[in-house]
Amino acid sequence: MKLPRDPDVHVLSSPSTGESPVPAEDLRLPRLATTAGTEVASAGVARAVVPGTEGYAAEAATLIERYERIPFADKHGPVLDLIPAAPINVLDIGAGSGADAAWFAQRGDRVLAVEPTDELRVAGSALHPSPLIEWADDSLPHLASIMTRRRTFDVVMVTAVWMHLDPAERALAMPNVVSLMGRGGVLIMSLRHGPSSPRRRTFEVTAEETVELAGAHGLEAILNVRAESAQLANRQAGVTWSRLAFRRSTPASTASER
């Protein structure tokens, strides 16, 4: 059976589109030297790397060009009908360069864009300035600072993130994500299958186990489709994606902030 294509934002080769990429020199990203478990800023101050984000700082300029080339509708086509009408509150976990956050903001939605890699978060804020987008430095599985805000959201995006968590971290992350969803809220996820960059910390995770874990925390699966990568090199390497969506029908445990 031929799989539908799904744009692969973590790609082995750049997408070929007619759009002009954001020039890397225009991003003015800080230059970092990386070592095992740390990133060393240009000022010489070492900081711990958040597990699961390995490789992203070093490849930030290249990744941002790729992220910005892919239209939201191409990347998230299977879930477009599941996104409620604007205006809504959106939590984008692993927001990258902010391309998805910008799409929501253009609709009039309020977005909390969570990105633990400084190079992506700083560039995203500069590329997509909007009073409707708030940026936060936080990460799964704990989302420690986000959890203290006592907010819930109509849509939670977890795009190309879940496979960077090991099984124990995924078990910790799911209830935290669910607690941030309002009643009737939608969780949208994508899981990568197949080879990945050797610089990345990546684990194989199936759609079936993700559906089971989400169900154990009160979520109903409303979408589960498999798609091949939009990138020729990745298709040849056997990369595919699972596109998942869930709805929460039980009341949220935190107070919604509108």
Image: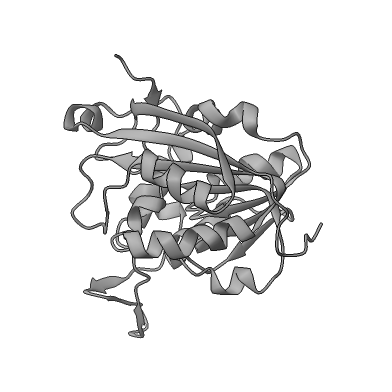
Q: Spot the residue most to the top.
A: 1
Q: Quadrant of residue 169?
A: bottom left
Front-lying residue, 237 or 23: 237
Q: Is residue 222 above or below residue 140?
A: above
Q: Residue at x 32, y 71 (%)?
A: 32
Tally of numbered tags: 0
Q: Residue at x 78, y 42 (%)?
A: 87
Q: Spot the residue most to the right.
A: 258
Residue 78 x/y as whole percent: 52, 26
Q: Is residue 23 visible?
A: no
Q: Residue at x 30, y 61 (%)?
A: 58
Q: Is residue 208 visible?
A: yes
- Colouring chosen for the image of the structure: one colour
Q: Is residue 84 left or right of residue 195?
A: right
Q: Is residue 1 left or right of residue 73?
A: left
Front-lying residue, 12 or 43: 12
Q: Quadrant of the N terminus?
A: top left
Q: Quadrant of the C terminus?
A: bottom right
Front-lying residue, 45 or 4: 4
Residue 144 x/y as whole percent: 55, 74
